[in-house]
Image (spheres, rainbow, N blue to C red):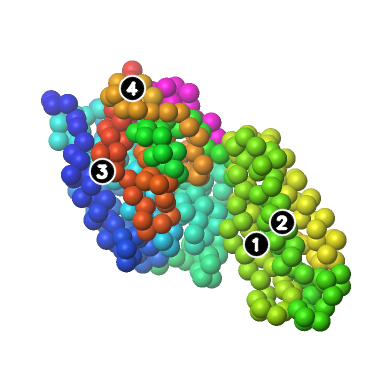
Amino acid sequence: MATPSINGPRLLASLAELGQVGALEGGGVCRLALTDADKAGRDWTVARMRALGMSVSIDAIGNVVATHAGQQDGPAVMTGSHIDTVRTGGLYDGNYGVLAGLEVVAALRDAGVRTRRPIAVAFFTNEEGARFAPDMMGSLVYQGGLALEAALSTTGIDGKTVGDELRRIGYAGPAPVGANRVDSFIELHIEQGPVLHREGVRIGVVEGVQGISWTEFTVHGVSNHAGTTPMNMRNDAGYVAACVATFARDLTRRLGGNQIATVGAVTLAPNLVNVIPNKAVFTVDLRNTDGEALKAAEAQLWAQAERIASEEGVRCERRMLARFDPVAFDPAVVRRIESIAAGRNLSHRRMPSGAGHDAQMLAPMCPTGMIFVPSIDGLSHNVRERTEPEDLVAGAEVLLQALTDLANRP
């Protein structure tokens, strides 16, 4: 038997080929979850799985798990990610983890190697959450954190439900959710941030994922003439939204550490230049690696929103869109990935993940870890998302060794 090795040109060609499904001008991709483009991407990926001789299982939430048999039956060592994208996605977010996993299987087949345990490659439904909230829906259902029926009844931004769209595209599978037993899980992903690229580091050894809190605020004010209404007689919903947005930014400076805040969506009504807004709907995304610090940030943000609304004489409502506690990955898996990178003379550093990933949903089920490779200039969710080819191949080589080490351990 030969020593398995990643075929770099084959991996890069597969990424480019999948990138043609839902391709955007400028090199990006749009495959919102459960759209026709997502179906086409799923069909392409499943065909690639079957061409590798893998057994393919599709569950009731549309998660796809392909298994390469081991010498023994039992829970599989799993890798994977997602293939759905945001509207302005790149070629690598999610897709890289899935296709690198399939390249690992191809490399094992090329070398005539069969590991002790099975190796599985998965892609999970609606990781991005761009069409249906919450994000990481498929993996959340997979590990039991969200009831299947609740997920299937979720209505998207276009008024369609998850269940109806799964049936429409033919991916409401027969397998029970979570039927695939998992020995351990490693997800390979682009960093989606600037740290590795700016520091010239090849491999990110991910220790865990930040906690995430998404709140949607709706402020109800009174529309009035912008020129004739004195400043002290206004009930301005837009002003409240602006105050909360600046407070969120100031909050990160006061709390310091790893606290992050983003106001990503704002809608004003009637949205006219000379009319005081009578309604503002906006979101605040809070993240922190420290669970207690995240709770403190939430409490301060919510209290400030209520205080400003009261002072302005308007009504403020809030709704949680998503809430995930911080997740720490398995120390032994983290050390294994770190050791592999060092053994290959690849520069590496430990780091948290700023974005949410399917791996954080698998972490309660089994020993879990993540591998990052650099994103050029930190760009992701952007048609100009790029990672150097040699980094894509290096990350896949680390994944190959990590998976085979786990699959062959006694």
Q: Looking at the picture, does residue 210 appear above or below residue 245?
A: above
Q: Is label 4 in a helix, a strand or a loop? A: helix
Q: Is label 1 in a helix, a strand or a loop? A: strand
Q: Which residues are magenta?
A: 326-336
In reply to whether residue 199 is colored magenta, the answer given is no
- The three-letter amino acid code for the residue at tag 4 is Ala
Front residue of 66 and 376: 376
Say whether disc 3 or disc 1 marks the residue closer to the N-terminus.
Answer: 1
Relative image position of residue 162 (x, y in whole percent): 49, 62
- The three-letter amino acid code for the residue at tag 1 is Phe
Question: Are circles 3 and 4 on residues that touch, CB within 8 Å?
Answer: no
Say whether disc 4 or disc 2 marks the residue closer to the N-terminus.
Answer: 2
Relative image position of residue 105 (x, y in whole percent): 24, 38
Residue position for label 1: 282
Relative image position of residue 202 (x, y in whole percent): 34, 33
Residue position for label 4: 342
- The three-letter amino acid code for the residue at tag 3 is Pro
Q: Which mark is residue 389?
A: 3
Q: Is label 2 in a helix, a strand or a loop? A: helix
CA–CA distance between discs 1 and 2?
10 Å
Local packing at callout 1 (Cα closer than 10 Å; few below 14, some 14-19, many 20+) is many
Which residue extends farthest left? 1
Question: Are circles 3 and 1 on residues that touch, CB within 8 Å?
Answer: no
CA–CA distance between discs 4 and 1?
45 Å
Relative image position of residue 109 (x, y in whole percent): 17, 36
The quadrant of the rendering that contains the C terminus is top left
Q: Which mark is residue 244?
A: 2
Local packing at callout 4 (Cα closer than 10 Å; few below 14, some 14-19, many 20+) is few
Question: Are circles 1 and 2 on residues that touch, CB within 8 Å?
Answer: yes
The quadrant of the rendering that contains the N terminus is top left
Which residue extends farthest top? 410
